[in-house]
Image (cartoon, rainbow, N blue to C red):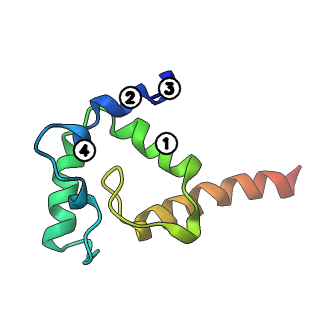
């Protein structure tokens, strides 16, 4: 693991006893039990902000899956879109 990625060692999803599959449920209903359970783990994570920044910078929008940083693929798509609008508006205005 490279130094910039060392934050992953402190991530709640890496804690002993946490099943990595919990973050990739088949049912991604935001109000469903599986997503709620994954969000609960993410909610206790001390590096959730770093996780979110990492996924937003590196995730292929066409391949979003699972609950990452407590967000579903649809929520990350919406966040990505919300981040792009001000950037594109600034580019057009320049």
Which part of the image, by quadrant, shows the N terminus?
Answer: top left
* Nearer-the-camera pick, 34 or 88: 34
Q: Is residue 70 left or right of residue 22?
A: right
Mark earlier in primary sequence (2, 3): 3
Q: Residues within 10 Å of mark 3 (few under 14, many from 20)?
A: few
The disc, 4 or 1, on the residue closer to the chain's N-terminal end is 4
Question: In the displayed image of the protein, which residue is found farthest to the front?
Answer: 1
Of the image marks 2 and 4, the number of the one nearer the N terminus: 2
Residue under label 4: 13
Q: Which residue is mark 2?
A: 7
Helix, strand, or loop for circle 1? helix
Between tags 1 and 2, which lies in front? 2
> Looking at the rendered structure, which numbered label has been put on residue 61?
none
Q: Whole-percent x and y of residue 25?
A: 25, 70
Marks 1 and 2, the one that precedes in the sequence: 2
Q: Mark 4 or mark 3, which has the lower sequence index? A: 3
| C-alpha separation, residue under disc 4 versus residue under disc 3 | 18 Å
25 left or right of 72 in image = left
Alpha carbons under labels 2 and 3: distance apart: 10 Å
Residue wearing tag 1: 53
Residue located 46% across and 30% down the image: 5
Q: Would you place residue 85 above or below residue 52 in this image? A: below
In depth, the one of 85 and 22 nearer the eye is 22
Residue marked by disc 3: 2
Query: Which of the 4 quarters of the picture holds residue 44?
Result: top left
């Amino acid at each position: 693991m490279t130094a910039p990625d060392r934050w992953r060692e402190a991530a709640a999803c890496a804690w002993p006893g946490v099943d990595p599959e919990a973050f990739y449920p088949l049912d991604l209903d935001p109000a469903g039990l599986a997503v709620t359970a994954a969000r609960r783990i993410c909610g206790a994570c001390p590096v959730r902000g770093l996780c979110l920044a990492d996924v937003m910078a590196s995730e292929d929008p066409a391949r979003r899956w699972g609950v990452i940083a407590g967000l579903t693929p649809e929520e990350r798509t919406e966040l990505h879109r919300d981040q792009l609008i001000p950037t594109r508006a600034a580019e057009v205005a320049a």
